[in-house]
């Protein structure tokens, strides 16, 4: 390739080339600048989308980390709570009466009014009181201080999600309720601590008591099952296909199958699980184990492909040296190649498991979107 | 009971390993020349005990429930199941099982109580039986393996053959999965097309799959034309790709070719967050945020929630595909670019030369892969 010198002393043909190139310089410059501009614009668009996504999630969700609690004096009425049958005592009435003390202008014998007043407290307050009294029956007849969450409409009111300016019939809490709540707030009984129940409670019918524990524990068991099943299977299959399989039609067929499975939509694995695991084998419908099994089938091709790539990346000199030292084929693979390929294998596994953690489509089909009010205690629960 | 079986299996495996290894080492210590390392002798015994018995336990656990259910239902007094549909039979079985586990509602009939007792007894028996079979089987195999230890016993070859067999089994799991998928889909498809004619499905223009399943259910008549479903998918895919392909390609080209090093280091991980977000989050985001904005109100609860217009989903799908496209273009060999630039061609010129033959087949193939992952 001849050097293109600026003054074109190479001869007439080089002169013409140089002139042609220089003539098109400005046009090519501009094209490159345009490309750069579009590239930057595309990056800006993508970043904008990301920020909108994350921003909207955070801005609507951050309220959930704080919960409104009310601290009230509860007189544990021995008339309502019989000492013989503690768990079945009238804890709701106790709470209702105690709360009614703060609103002397409300007639607590009127059922509707009483219900309105006691609706300030969350439905779980009675169970908190019950647990305390059952643990320490000497509390009967005493006045104790309790800090319980408020029910959902008042919680939203305190967080500003229920606008006080909207018309009364469009609001969740009417004016009288707001007045009562404000009265409690003015006397300092309302506090807004961190919502630890978000992590310790499972699903609930009452929004103020709902938590993520069911989802977290279920995901943990399902992912654990997925890892335990797909990791050995995937590595075994990949090692066989990469190192030991003879180049015949059977191994070609297996390879085609695995590449096919990598591209199958995850919904189809859900159908497979529904038909075979739940239909044929009769496994329990909402167990994390079945979910983990489905996810394992889905993650298997990813792990196999990543492991094969990692094995291919080990230099052949290692294999030859090991064979030269006298190792058998198995020893070459398991003692020399596999440890070197482990970082790549683990990367592929992490990617596969991260994908599995986020996949909901196959789990929907095997019925794992059930509404369960307690976290699973094991993978078969 | 099953836990005990697993514990016994595990301990006998370890025992076999240690026993054989010690014996082999003793032979070596006695001066003879072993064919295989002592560890392989131990491994031979361990694998020989572990693999068949583990398979046995798993098969037992898988089919125990079904078989016991069948036996219990068959042993009910004759005539109790006459005239019951499949649903009622399953309901009866569920009731018997709940009685067996201690949750009794009301007063069940005598034969149900008897059946529940039989169920409990059979489960117990099955557990004990499994334990005994596991123990005796493992010990028998252990003794057999122990007898094989000798100086010229080719333990390494046997172990390697077992391991190869295990790996072949792993590889064939993929085939089983494919066969399972094909079988499940075919079975359901045959059932479907026996109820709905094929022409109705392929050319019908109305998709309303609500039909009564039982006789006493009230539901719509149902229409199973799939044309709206196909068209909807095509529309979504087209809009998604129209947004994603240019944005993704341009982002990749810019990051790869023109971006200064610091810029790339910061922007690349941020954009890869887009690829790592679970797809269900995009769905929720589209429904809760984008759809509300488009409708103009702040999500008043009394507004009827009709079918989500495809527009919101497109934007989400577009954003989702960005990093994937970018990733594949980035993986082009850098040395080709360096070669051409060194020869005096312009940056962009080199790019177009290189982005021609090298990755042109790659991009459409990648797009097809991404398209298929479109649930």
Image (cartoon, helix red, strand yellow):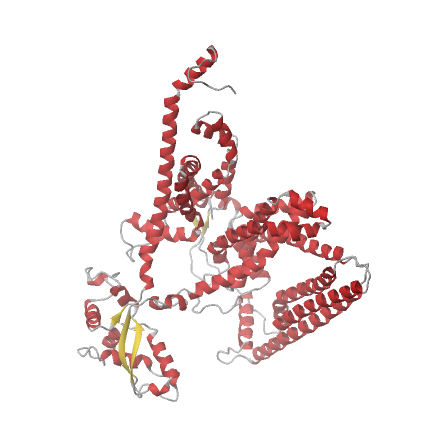
State whether residue B347 appears in this view.
yes
Instruction: Give the percent coordinates (x, y) of residue B228.
Output: 43, 44
Q: Is residue B6 above or below residue A231?
A: below
* Quarter location, residue B149: bottom right
Instruction: Give the percent coordinates (x, y) of residue A306.
Output: 56, 48
State whether residue B179 appears in this view.
no
* Quarter location, residue A182: bottom left
Q: Residue at x 39, y 20 (%)?
A: A24
Q: Residue at x 52, y 30 (%)?
A: B357
Q: Is residue A359 above or below residue B46?
A: above
Seen as rendered, the residue at the extreme left is: A105
User: Foreground: B245 or A330?
Assistant: A330
Instruction: Give the percent coordinates (x, y) of residue B326.
Output: 45, 40
Query: Is residue B245 found left or right of A339 in the rendered image?
Result: left
User: Foreground: B303 or B258?
Assistant: B258
Seen as rendered, the residue at the extreme top is: A12
Instruction: Give the percent coordinates (x, y) of residue A27.
Output: 37, 23
User: Foreground: B61 or B304?
Assistant: B61
* Quarter location, residue B99: bottom right
Numbered disc total? 0
């Amino acid at each position: 390739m001849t050097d293109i010198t600026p003054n074109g002393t190479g001869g007439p043909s080089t002169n013409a080339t140089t002139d042609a190139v220089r003539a098109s310089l400005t046009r090519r410059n501009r094209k490159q600048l345009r490309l750069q501009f579009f590239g930057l614009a595309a990056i800006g668009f993508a970043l904008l989308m990301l920020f909108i996504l994350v921003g909207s999630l955070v801005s609507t969700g951050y309220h959930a980390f704080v919960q409104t609690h009310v601290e009230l004096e509860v007189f544990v009425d021995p008339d309502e709570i019989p000492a013989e049958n503690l768990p079945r005592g009238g804890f709701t009435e106790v709470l209702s009466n105690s709360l009614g003390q703060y609103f002397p202008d409300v007639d607590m014998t009127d059922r509707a009014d009483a219900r309105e007043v006691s609706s300030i407290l969350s439905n779980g307050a009675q169970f908190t009181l019950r647990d305390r009294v059952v643990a320490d029956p000497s509390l009967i007849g005493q006045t104790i201080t309790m800090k319980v969450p408020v029910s959902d409409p008042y919680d939203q009111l305190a967080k500003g999600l229920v606008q006080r300016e909207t018309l009364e019939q469009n609001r969740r809490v009417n004016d009288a309720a707001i007045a009562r709540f404000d009265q409690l707030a003015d006397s300092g009984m309302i506090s807004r601590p961190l919502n630890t129940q978000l992590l310790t409670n499972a699903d609930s019918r009452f929004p103020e008591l709902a938590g993520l524990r069911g989802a977290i524990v279920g995901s943990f068991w399902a992912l654990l099952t997925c890892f335990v099943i797909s990791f050995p299977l995937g590595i075994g299959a990949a090692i066989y296909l990469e190192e030991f399989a003879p180049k015949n039609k059977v191994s070609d067929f297996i390879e085609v199958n695995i590449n096919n499975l990598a591209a199958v939509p995850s919904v189809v694995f859900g159908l497979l699980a529904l038909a075979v695991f739940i239909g044929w084998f009769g496994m329990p419908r909402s167990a994390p184990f079945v979910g983990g099994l489905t996810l394992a089938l889905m993650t298997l091709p990813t792990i196999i492909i990543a492991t094969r790539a990692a094995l291919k990346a080990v230099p052949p000199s290692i294999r030859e040296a090991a064979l030269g030292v006298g190792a058998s084929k198995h020893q070459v693979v398991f003692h020399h190649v596999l440890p070197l390929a482990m970082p790549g294998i683990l990367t592929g596994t992490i990617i596969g498991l991260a994908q599995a953690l986020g996949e909901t489509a196959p789990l929907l089909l095997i019925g794992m979107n059930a509404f369960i009010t307690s976290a699973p205690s094991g993978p078969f629960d | 009971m099953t836990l005990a079986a697993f514990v016994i299996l595990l301990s006998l495996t370890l025992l076999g390993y240690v026993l054989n290894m010690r014996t082999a080492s003793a032979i070596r210590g006695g001066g003879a020349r072993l064919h295989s390392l002592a560890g392989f002798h131990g491994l031979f015994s361990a694998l020989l005990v572990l693999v068949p018995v583990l398979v046995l336990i798993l098969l037992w656990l898988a089919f125990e429930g079904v078989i016991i259910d069948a036996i219990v239902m068959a042993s009910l007094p004759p005539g109790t199941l006459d005239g019951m549909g499949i649903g009622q039979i399953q309901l009866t079985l569920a009731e018997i099982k709940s009685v067996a586990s201690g949750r009794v509602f009301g007063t069940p009939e005598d034969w149900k109580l008897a059946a529940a007792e039989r169920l409990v007894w059979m489960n117990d028996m099955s557990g004990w039986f499994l334990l005994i079979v596991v123990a005796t089987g493992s010990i028998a195999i252990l003794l057999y393996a122990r007898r094989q230890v000798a100086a010229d016993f080719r333990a390494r070859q046997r172990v390697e053959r077992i391991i190869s067999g295990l790996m072949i089994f792993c590889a064939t799991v993929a085939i089983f999965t494919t066969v399972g998928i094909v079988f499940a889909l075919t079975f359901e498809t045959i059932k479907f097309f026996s109820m709905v004619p094929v022409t109705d499905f392929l050319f019908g223009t109305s998709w309303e799959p609500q039909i009564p399943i039982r006789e006493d259910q009230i539901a719509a008549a149902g229409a199973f034309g799939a044309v709206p479903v196909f068209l909807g998918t095509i529309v979504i895919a087209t809009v998604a790709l129209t947004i994603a392909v240019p944005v993704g390609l341009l982002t990749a080209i810019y990051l790869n070719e023109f971006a200064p090093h610091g810029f790339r280091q910061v922007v690349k991980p941020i954009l890869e967050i887009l690829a790592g977000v679970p797809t269900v989050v995009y769905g929720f985001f589209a429904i809760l945020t984008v759809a509300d904005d488009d409708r103009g109100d702040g999500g008043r609860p009394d507004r009827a929630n009709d079918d989500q217009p495809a527009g919101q989903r497109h934007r989400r799908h577009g954003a989702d595909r960005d990093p994937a496209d970018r990733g594949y273009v980035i993986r082009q060999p850098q040395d080709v670019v360096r070669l051409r630039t060194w020869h005096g061609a312009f940056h962009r010129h080199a790019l177009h030369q290189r982005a021609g033959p090298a990755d042109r087949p790659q991009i459409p193939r990648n797009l097809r892969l991404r398209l298929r992952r479109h649930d």
